[in-house]
Amino acid sequence: MRLRIAQAVAQAGTYPVAERTLALLAEAALVPSAESPGYRVIDRTGAPRHVSEADGTLVPMDLSALLAEFRDRHPALFRPIPEPDPAPAPEPVPAEDFRTATARFVESQSVLARSLVARSATRSRALATALSGRLATLRRNGVASSLPEPPAPGSAAAPAEPSRAGLVAGRVREGAQRVGGYARGRLADSASRLGEVARDRNVMRDALSRRALPIGLGAAALVALLAVFGGRTPQEAASPDAGGAAQSPSQAASTAAPPSAPDMSPAPPEEAPPKQAVANEISGPVEVIDTATLRVGGKLIRLFGVEWVRGGQADELTRYLAGRTVTCQPVAGSEARLCAVDGRDLSEVVLFNGGGRASPEATPDLVAAEDHARAERLGVWAR
């Protein structure tokens, strides 16, 4: 029994110096018994001691329960019970999968790109519609002006004015050429920008490439219309009036009664006065200082409606001009000038390609060109 007590005391986690004391206390509380487990735990009066199970049943106290009671009464004789190791913390679960976040980001950027391209296509269609309407109006006015007026009954036909018809035809021709040059310039700028976009490898390039074909086809159709409507020369435009003028004298001669009537044939047509140069107009080779400042004919000129910002590439403007002659005209109430090359407004070309920003004095057309560059993220708007 003593050996059994010694083993139980050693297993209970006692200090070595207290093992003998606890063994003596246990021997005093135990008496041998023929029943299992071979001993009984008694109190001071010699009565057996019992403990309650979890279900409330009383059972005889054993040696382990006695040592547990000693730990409660004399905790200084026992080593402290080691605390259990803390459970490992669960691995943090990522709040959002990286691939899912990337897919959402790409989808949002694609939606933005599609909206920008749709807005640009809408503006291009509106511009093409406006140009077509303007060209049709000029064409109708030219045809209406070229038709001769029928002579009044019973009166001699008035002498025709071929010089006026020639002036009208010349104005129609000049307007058609100006519109055609403007449209061709826009088409060339759009083609160059579409080429640059085709070299970009990003989401915006994919979105733009899907809309580039309809825009290019629409611009090509517009140029074809301009070529058809504006292909007549001033001589062809004036031919109906000349025929009418030639017919009117013959009719007047046939209807005149006396052979000695005065000659009513029209005077020889006068030549149209040559186009006079605008006062203070500057024309000549150009040197690009920046995208908003030029040197034309040795004079420093600032482009009307354009404000230079950091990022404007002067070398691109130099390549665009390619040594062509630039004509600059003054603007009332402004120190800047309106400059054109081959009939194209140079300020609009710069803003359309993102070479600068529109100044406070810019016209609505220049502001619309800046909006196009901002929507397409061209030039200074690429940041």
Image (cartoon, rainbow, N blue to C red):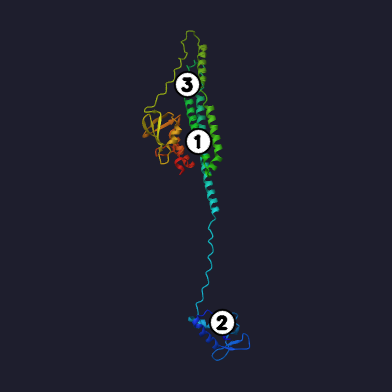
Measured along the vertical axis of the image, is residue 76 above or below residue 269? below
Q: SS of the residue at dot 3?
A: helix
Which residue is more in the foreground, 19 or 262? 19
Q: Which of marks 3 and 2 is nearer the N terminus?
A: 2
Residue type (three-letter) at the residue carrying disc 2: Gln
Please give the residue where the numbered disc 2 appears in the rendered image: 7
Q: In the rendered image, which residue does mark 1 sit on?
A: 192
Q: Residue at x 50, y 35 (%)?
A: 192
Residue nearer the viewer, 131 or 97 = 97
Instruction: Find numbered disc 2 in the image and state the secondary structure of the residue it sits on.
Output: helix
Q: In this view, does 34 lie to the left or right of 249?
A: right
Q: Distance between the residues labelled 1 and 3?
A: 38 Å
* Marking on residue 166: 3
Q: Residue 353 carries which label?
A: none
Q: Distance between the residues labelled 3 and 2?
A: 133 Å
Q: In which quarter of the image is the N terminus?
A: bottom right
Q: How far from the left and from the top, in percent, is residue 214?
A: 56, 37
Identify the amino acid type marked 3: Gly
In the rendered image, the quadrant that contains the C terminus is top left
The percent position of residue 88, horizontal first and vertical second, equals 53, 66
Please report whichever mark, 2 or 1, sits nearer to the chain's N-terminal start. Answer: 2
